[in-house]
Image (spheres, rainbow, N blue to C red):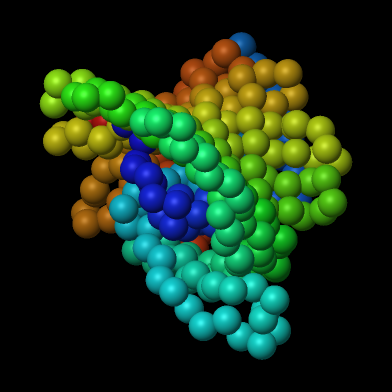
């Protein structure tokens, strides 16, 4: 189950938070892991995981991601609307981004019981390390027939660091209702393009049940696939992430703490209590 960002406003708040999180590490270099048959270079594992930690924090925040309307200052007067997005991190702090944008109905078509709509946005995302041009869109298709209904939604958000270099956030959702039973499918994907070429794609899988939550990332880049599964735990009142990783076919586990804005890793803990 992926967190529900079904409304357009909620999704663009999430898109701004996810893109802002990834942009906070954009431009850093990530060395490919030098894997040995029985050991990892810990510093390189930390570098890889650090790239995704802001994104992980923004998604684990789930409904903790909030947004509110803001005033549009003179310097951004070309845009109609402003949104302040707040996202808590695992250390109890808050990451804040501001989105200045214009939002327009691009098309609407109704044919009997079927309705299709699409929207476009353009704007600027302001983060702690710069301003980034953004654009996005959404489309929805609704169909009903007696006691049956089907809704399909696609939403996307792009933040640019150059003319052909950008981060793209997508959500696809489908809701089917039949005889008072509802089935929902929802997928999030994130893509990184550099000079018009897709260099990285990430699929997000989030599950939350009564006994806890976990977040899985499947990352494809440089011709290989890595996976990271983050499971939050509370230890002495602090949130700690237990991580199970499969890096280029090799498994490892570790803990991630956040202290004074810096991520700290522990590889030698007793992991039995986290299984």
- Residue 46 in view in this figure: no
Q: Quadrant of the C terminus?
A: top left
Residue at position x 40%, y 39% in the image: 255
Left or right, residue 177 beside residue 266: left
Q: Give the vertical position of 99 relative to 145 (above or below).
A: below
Q: Is residue 149 left or right of residue 109?
A: left
| Residue at x 38% of width, y 46% of height | 5
Residue 262 locus on image (x, y percent): 51, 58
Q: Nearer the viewer, residue 5 or 129?
A: 5
Residue found at x 21% / y 54% = 236
**Up-down relation of residue 195 to residue 271 (above or below):** below
* Lateral position of residue 74 relative to residue 209, left or right: right
Q: Which of 106 and 153 lies nearest the eye of the viewer?
A: 106
Q: Quadrant of residue 65?
A: bottom left
The quadrant of the image that shows the N terminus is top left
Q: Position of residue 40 (x, y in %)?
A: 59, 25
Decide if residue 160 is in sight here.
yes
Q: Is residue 66 left or right of residue 199?
A: left
- Residue 221 placement: quadrant: top right
């Amino acid at each position: 189950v992926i967190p529900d960002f079904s409304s357009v406003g909620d999704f663009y708040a999430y898109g701004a938070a996810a893109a802002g999180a990834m942009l906070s590490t954009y431009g850093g270099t990530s060395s490919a892991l030098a894997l040995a048959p029985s050991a990892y270079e810990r510093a390189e594992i930390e570098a890889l995981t650090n790239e995704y930690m802001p994104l992980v924090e923004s998604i684990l925040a789930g409904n903790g991601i909030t947004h509110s309307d803001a005033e549009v200052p003179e310097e951004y007067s070309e845009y109609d609307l402003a949104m302040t997005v707040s996202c808590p991190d695992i250390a109890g702090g808050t990451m804040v981004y501001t989105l200045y944008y214009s939002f327009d109905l691009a098309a609407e078509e109704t044919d009997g019981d079927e309705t299709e709509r699409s929207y476009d946005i353009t704007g600027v995302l302001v983060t702690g390390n710069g301003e980034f041009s953004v654009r996005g869109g959404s489309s929805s298709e609704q169909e009903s027939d007696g006691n049956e209904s089907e809704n399909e939604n696609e939403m996307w958000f792009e933040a640019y660091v150059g003319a052909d270099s950008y981060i793209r956030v997508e959500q696809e959702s489908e809701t089917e209702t039949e005889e008072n039973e509802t089935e929902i499918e929802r997928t999030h994907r994130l893509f990184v393009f550099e000079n018009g070429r897709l260099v990285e794609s990430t699929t997000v899988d989030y599950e939350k049940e009564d006994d806890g939550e976990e977040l899985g990332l499947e990352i494809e880049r440089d011709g290989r696939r890595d996976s990271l599964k983050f499971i939050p735990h509370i230890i002495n009142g602090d949130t700690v992430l237990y991580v199970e990783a499969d890096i280029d076919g090799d498994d490892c586990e570790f803990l991630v703490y956040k202290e004074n804005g810096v991520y700290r890793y522990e590889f030698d803990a007793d992991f039995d209590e986290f299984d």
